[in-house]
Amino acid sequence: MAEKTVFKKILDGELPADVVYQDDWCMAFRDINPQAPVHILVIPRKEIPALRDAGEEDRELLGHLLLVANRVARQQRLDDYRVVINCGAEAGQTVWHLHLHVLGGRPMNWPPG
Ligand code: DGP
């Protein structure tokens, strides 16, 4: 069996995390290596390795994750924020469990590096 990702270990309670929100579909917790004053990861409980692995059956889940990103941003008192999904190694993905980065609390540059 493939080894569990760190995010699956967090979901299973095997690794600690600073959880800011959770429900039946997802969990949100602070990134261990924050790139902004607020940097939260939103992950589905379902094990989807990357966005490219999501399918039609995940339509409702994907919408839910965006709404949770919005909810978490509001909870953190962010009006302006950025949501990032890195899909694939070349795009910067390092953990093979779909996750949304919610970043805020400082001005953001464009284009991203
Ligand atoms: P990405 O590069 O898009 O795959 O983002 C992975 C993020 O996950 C990265 O910003 C660091 C974060 N991360 C990695 N391991 C852990 C961990 O054990 N705990 C937490 N809270 N975040 C982690």
Image: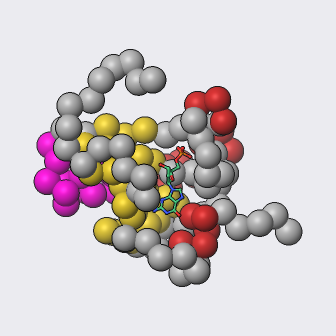
Q: Is residue 99 left or right of residue 93?
A: left
Residue 72 lies within the magenta run: yes
The stretch of residues the image draws in magenta is: 63-79
Q: Residue furthest top?
A: 111
The prevailing secondary structure element of the residues shown in magenta is: helix
Based on the picture, tell me whether residue 89 belongs to the magenta stretch. Answer: no
Give coordinates of residue 80: x percent, y percent.
19, 38
Could you tell me residue 75's position as x and y percent? 19, 60
Judge by depth and name the residue closer to the eye, 65 or 20. 20
Q: List x then y, in percent, for residue 93.
A: 59, 41
Q: Is residue 56 visible?
A: no
Left or right position of 76 against 55: left
Q: Residue at x 36, y 43 (%)?
A: 35
**How many numbered marks appear?**
0
Q: Is residue 38 above or below residue 3?
A: above
Q: In percent of the image, x 37 and y 71: which residue is there? A: 19
- Give the residue at x 61% y 51%: 95
The spot of residue 41 in percent (x, y) is 42, 55
Q: Quadrant of the N terminus?
A: bottom right
